Amino acid sequence: MHIKEYRRLFNRLNKYSDIKTLSKKDNYDEELLLVLYTQKIVRKATSRFYKVKSRSKELHKKWKKGQTIYEISKSIDFPPVLLGLLILNEEGITRKVYRNMLNDRGKAPTKRLRRELDEVVRKDAIYSPNGYEVQYKRGKYSEKEINDWLVDRGLKFRVEADLRNSYPKTPDFLLDKPINVRGTEIFWIESKATFGDAHEIHKNLKSQLKPYRELFGPGMVIYWFGFISPSPLTDGILIESKEFLDEWEE
């Protein structure tokens, strides 16, 4: 996707309902738009988390006076599930207990809290248990597709679980023998069930991809939902989309 089109979509994805609206108007796949929306919300929440956390006592007082978690979250434009954690921490409720209550609202100690947790889970498409499940399944599906692709071609490899105790950082797939991709010998493949914009690629290069290259040699990252063009490239690391799996020939 060209960077101008990416920016247009990214700027227009401001609420969950925008996904369906843009899909119908511009004929984009809803899952791609959900991925872009998720990345936008997570980055915004991450950048503001500690600023909002510094207001926890103030926001807790508003909740004690009768405002709901969702009403407060809407007023400060912050994910309701995350805000609930900050407010209920002031009540002495730990992160683990809070997560258990989100998964089973019957464990909430009061009717008010059960009702409000029902609401934040329903309204938060990203940080709710269902939101996490969607992201988890998406990641597992993309890894399985690459796994099956390698098996179908008789390419032997080791997965992250096989390597974890031997190396400080491990890619999703380490090939026993390298394959040639666009003139580069590739020793490993990393799967990302995301869209590779500049922010995502830079983050992955720093935390994972460059260390993999130093440990194992040149490799490849597959962004399942595509990447911006032109993309930032790094020597020894190829950036591809899922279409690569249909296009590559030995």
Image: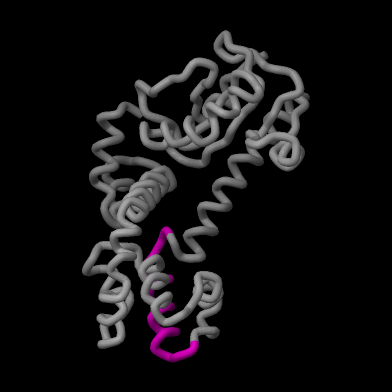
- Image-quadrant location for residue 231: top left
The residue shown at (69%, 39%) is 160
The kind of secondary structure the magenta stretch mainly shows is: helix
Q: Nearer the viewer, residue 156 or 30?
A: 156
**Which residue extends farthest bottom?**
111
* Colour theme: one colour
Q: Position of residue 149 (x, y in %)?
A: 68, 30
The residue shown at (26%, 53%) is 14
Q: Is residue 193 left or right of residue 59?
A: right
- Is residue 149 positioned above or below 106 on the image? above
Specify whether residue 51 is painted magenta: no
Specify whether residue 125 is painted magenta: yes
The residue shown at (62%, 28%) is 189
* Viewport quadrant of the N terminus: top left
Q: Position of residue 3 (x, y in %)?
A: 30, 29
- Number of numbered discs: 0
The answer to whether residue 128 of the structure is visible from this angle is yes
Q: Is residue 246 left or right of residue 64?
A: right
> Which span is picked out in magenta?
109-126
Q: Position of residue 128 (x, y in %)?
A: 46, 65
The residue shown at (28%, 53%) is 18
Q: Is residue 38 left or right of residue 108?
A: left
- Image-quadrant location for residue 100: bottom right
